Amino acid sequence: MLRNLFGRPSKATEDDVRLENSLAKTRSGVFGRLGSIFQANEITDELWEELEETLILGDVGVPVAQELVERTQKRVERENIKATRDAYLILQQEMVRILTPAEPMRIDDPRLLTIVLVVGVNGSGKTTTIGKMAHWYKNRGRKVVLGAADTFRAAAIDQLKIWGERAGVDVIAHEPGADPGAVVFDAVRASQESRQADLLIVDTAGRLQTKYNLMQELEKIKRVAAKQVHRAPHEVFLVLDASTGQNAISQAKSFKDSAGVTGIILTKLDGTSKGGAVLSINHELGVPVRFVGTGEQIADFAEFDPVAFVEGLVGQ
């Protein structure tokens, strides 16, 4: 029903199914209680209080939980809703509105070469995510090249080469310790000339905001890309571990301004009960979730869809 209200086809896409299935742990936890809250005979103050408490326990975050309840309550009153099941549907609609990006991704705009930088701390699943993204876009007709600009760790270069082989895409790499800017320069040239690619995804060194020299290096990478391709990089995706819940938001805030993040990729969504934190990310950061990792295999990757997410969250 929720899908129909937003003009979506009643049949879920393959990505939608992956996304909904990945939320099984979250759905079986605190969020499984949402439906029972709205099985009450009437809409009371106690219902709203219990709803806010449940959302907070579901790792939504206090500001977003309060806003969701307030929006839902006001609409229920304004539209003279009496049935609790209708109030429940309004809650889901408001969740979708919070999660819906204001603008489409620039990665899909028509251009000769699109450059995407992927940033994030070590251990977030960054390199694995790049391999999955390469596989996802290759299956949709894009010619993909990977750039191994995380030159601080030999293991990162080797890991990217392995994922590139799995995805069936070329990886442009230098020796460990090489200048990351030089890697990007060569990766752009190779994408434009010998590989004739239309999508270059660049892995960058895992970093924290406090590591000033690494942030300076990221700025250099961006300048190198911009000199070679108009308005590059076209996207800067931050990879976050969904299992860290609200802590992922504080980590994202440290990256947002310094790295110019345009979108979030959430990993390990299938292995956590903290999926409710997704509702806080777009709201508190103003940066939309664009993709999610839904498992350990290369195909376990999906474009984020707010309607599919909410349906997976509440068990529609």
Image (cartoon, rainbow, N blue to C red):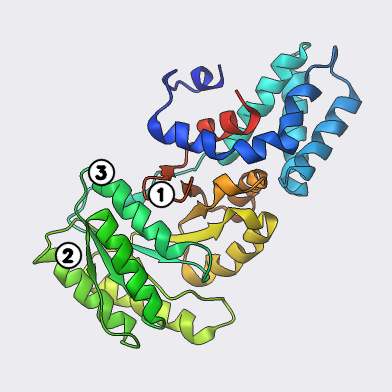
Q: Position of residue 125 (x, y in %)?
A: 48, 62
Q: Residue at x 60, y 55 (%)?
A: 285
Q: Is residue 241 left or right of residue 259?
A: right
Q: Position of residue 11 (x, y in %)?
A: 42, 20
Residue 206 versus residue 314 in the image, above or below: below
Residue in view at x 50 percent, y 54 percent = 264
- Rendered location of residue 107, percent (x, y): 32, 51
Mark sitting on residue 189:
none
SS state under label 3? loop
Q: Is residue 143 left or right of residue 19?
A: left
Q: CA distance from mark 2 to mark 1?
A: 26 Å
**Which residue is at a point 53% across and 85% down the rendered structure image?**
212
Q: Position of residue 99 (x, y in %)?
A: 56, 40
Residue at coordinates 55% horizontally, 83% vertically from top-left? Answer: 211
* Residue placed under numbered mark 1 in the picture: 297
Query: What residue did someone put label 2 on?
Result: 191
Q: Are marks 2 and 3 in contact (CB under 8 Å)?
A: no
